[in-house]
Image (tube, grey):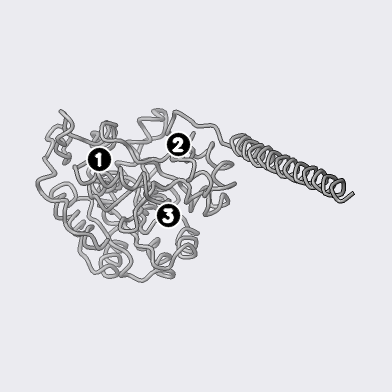
Amino acid sequence: MAHLLLTSANRVSARFAFIFTLSLSCTYLCYNILFYGGTVMTTQGYEGKRCPQSKSAGGKKLLGKLGHCASQDVGSAARRGSGDLRDQTKPPDSPGAHWTDGNLKNMTVAQKYGNKKLPNALIVGVKKGGTRAVLEFIRIHPDVRALGTEPHFFDRNYDRGLDWYRGLMPRTLDSQITLEKTPSYFVTRDAPRRISRMSHETKLIVVVRNPVTRAISDYTQTLSKKPDIPTFEELAFKNKSLGVVDTAWNAIRIGMYIVHLENWLQYFRPSQMHFVSGERLITDPAGEMGRVQDFLGLKRIITDKHFYFNRTKGFPCLKKPESSSQPRCLGKSKGRTHVQIEQDVIEQLQEFYRPFNIRFYETVGQDFKWD
């Protein structure tokens, strides 16, 4: 009898052990199915939300396609890689870029380890003053990363939000400055207030030149696109015989620098603004860029060795980097021959601008010698 009871107990124990082992196996199997299945499903859902990558980095296409994608999840896009956000930093061999070995090394490191940040500094003006030259020259510096296109965030695209704006920026390391250029900011009424809301400590660069020369350059550019527009004289004056200048014409109004500056000084300290002479940028590019580097708190790396004067264009160009067989000059639209304007028209405009220029000199503490 005792032997039978012992045999029965052994059978019950064996069955229990079998059932327990089978339960553990089933639990483990179900766990693996759920875990790996959930991972696959999550990955597929994530991939489905990707914005399509574009082969074009053009400004208008860039702005049109980025709005929806970047505003949804800039952080996620940054983790996926720079392609989704159309990083506007140009590679060494592309037009519009000039790189030293140090710059190229820092660019590579920044693309791999950097983050997209709101800009520390802005080139806010002025149109036809030399802003493109300043941007291209300062991009030589290894501690500067700049957006290649003009985002027009603070004048045309402000409703897209700061996340969209940040998404446009190149990746930078903590030690690097993020920079963008949009010359129309300087004459946009709301731009100073909007920029100060982003950061009260933003540094602002303004490139200015003789307002008469600037207006003629502005007109020359417009004429190349719209050859049927009225003459410069017709647009510049309401009544030439009386010397009444039409300040409603944008080409004239932009050159009234003090009018626009007074708006900026309501939101920024004078020490936050640096004024580059468009004339000296041509005759002494290294000197002007040295002062820009000082203003940005950068070591003076951009020097005379980076420039040579192109007599054909009448403008300084960047010497060729080691990786290129060609020197780097600005585009065909830069340094173009201006439309010939009658001397009496020039003199009348100089007389018109004189009081504005004097007030501007006094405010910024610098005589640009336009008179």
Picture disc at residue 117: 3
For the residues carrying marks 2 and 1, which lies nearer the camera in this image? 2
Amino acid on which disc 3 is placed: Lys
Mark 3 or mark 1: which comes first in sequence?
3
Residue 137: horizontal and vertical position, in percent?
A: 23, 46
Look at the numbered disc 3 and give the secondary structure of its residue: loop
Q: Which residue is mark 1?
A: 342
For the point 48% across and 64% down, the residue is 193
Mark 2 or mark 1: which comes first in sequence?
2
Say which quadrant the C terminus sits in: bottom left
State the CA–CA distance, disc 3 to disc 2. 16 Å
Find residue 30 and report its image quarter: top right
Q: Which class describes the residues within 10 Å of circle 2: few (<14), some (14-19), or many (20+)?
A: some
Amino acid on which disc 2 is placed: Gly
Q: Which class describes the residues within 10 Å of circle 3: few (<14), some (14-19), or many (20+)?
A: many
Proximity of marks 3 and 1: CB atoms separated by less than 8 Å: no
State the CA–CA distance, disc 2 to disc 1. 51 Å
Residue 56: horizontal and vertical position, in percent?
A: 44, 30
State the CA–CA distance, disc 3 to disc 1. 48 Å
Q: Which class describes the residues within 10 Å of circle 1: few (<14), some (14-19), or many (20+)?
A: few
Amino acid on which disc 1 is placed: Glu
Q: Is residue 302 left or right of residue 110?
A: left
Q: Which residue is mark 2?
A: 83
Q: Is residue 268 above or below residue 24?
A: below
Residue 25: horizontal and vertical position, in percent?
A: 70, 40
For the point 51% across and 48% down, the residue is 156
